[in-house]
Structure formats: structure tokens, C-alpha cells
Image (spheres, rainbow, N blue to C red):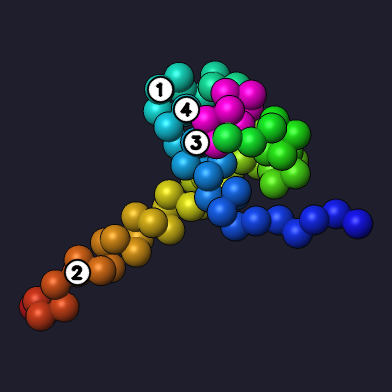
Amino acid sequence: MARPKSEDKKQALLDAATTAFAQSGIAASTALIARKAGVAEGTLFRYFATKDDLLNALYLHLKQDLCQTMLANLDRTITLP
């Protein structure tokens, strides 16, 4: 029976991917990302079937973070003419 996936590991992989892609561009290897996250490369592929899946998940994660930050800092007292 497979162990349940950990949100902490998934987040660590997304954080590591952010760093790796910022440093090395899209050429950053999955082995490097896994190493930065402190997991085996096979673990990365338990969470993301392909590197493209990881990139898509990272895009959505960063987009969600950006939207949340923008909404949190929105001045709701300003009215439009």
C-alpha cells in the first residue's frame, strides 16, 4: 500500500523548483530540484509525473500566491469614478 502524499514534501518540491529555475532556467534538472528539496528524485515523480507537470503546478502555485498577495494589499476604500 502506497503512503499518502505529504503536503510538506510537495511544498518543498515547489520551493526547490522555484529556486532551481531562477538559478538555472528551465534547464534545471529534476535531480537538482529533488536534491534541493531534500528528497529522492523518485519522490519528485510521485508528486509530479513529468517535469512539465511540475512546471504547470509551479505556475499555478505562483499565480495563486501573486493573486492572494495582491488581494490582501488591495485598498478597498478607493472607489472608481
Question: Mark 1 or mark 3, which is nearer the start of the sequence?
Answer: 3
Real-space Cα separation, disc 1 to disc 2, in angstroms: 31 Å
Mark 1 touching mark 4, by CB under 8 A? yes
Label 3, label 1: how far apart the Cα atoms are: 11 Å
Mark 2 touches mark 3? (CB < 8 Å): no
Residue at x 34% of width, y 55% of height: 66
Q: Residues in magenta?
A: 30-37
The count of marks equals 4
Q: Is residue 22 above or below residue 9?
A: above
> Which element carries disc 1, helix, strand or loop?
helix
Does the magenta run of residues contain 34?
yes
Q: Position of residue 74 (x, y in %)?
A: 19, 69
**Residue closer to the observer: 80 or 3:** 3
- Per the model, the C-alpha gap separating discs 2 and 3 is 29 Å
- Of the numbered discs 2 and 3, the one sitting upstream in the chain is 3
Label for residue 16?
A: 3
Q: Are marks 4 and 2 in contact (CB under 8 Å)?
A: no
**Residue in the image at 47% along x and 42% along y:** 15
User: Image quadrant for the C terminus?
Assistant: bottom left
Name the amino acid type tagged 1.
Answer: Gln
Q: Classify residue 40 as left or right of residue 74.
A: right
Task: Say which amino acid is labelled 3.
Answer: Ala
Q: Seen in the image, is 54 located left or right of residue 14?
A: right
One can see residue 73 in this view: yes
Graded by Cα atoms within 10 Å as few (under 14), some (14 to 19) or many (20 or more), the crowding at tag 4 reads: many
Label 4 SS: helix
Which residue in the protein does label 2 denote? Answer: 74
Q: Secondary structure at mark 2?
A: loop
Residue 20, numbered label: 4
Report the residue marked by disc 1.
Answer: 23
The answer for how far apart the CA atoms under marks 1 and 4 are is: 5 Å
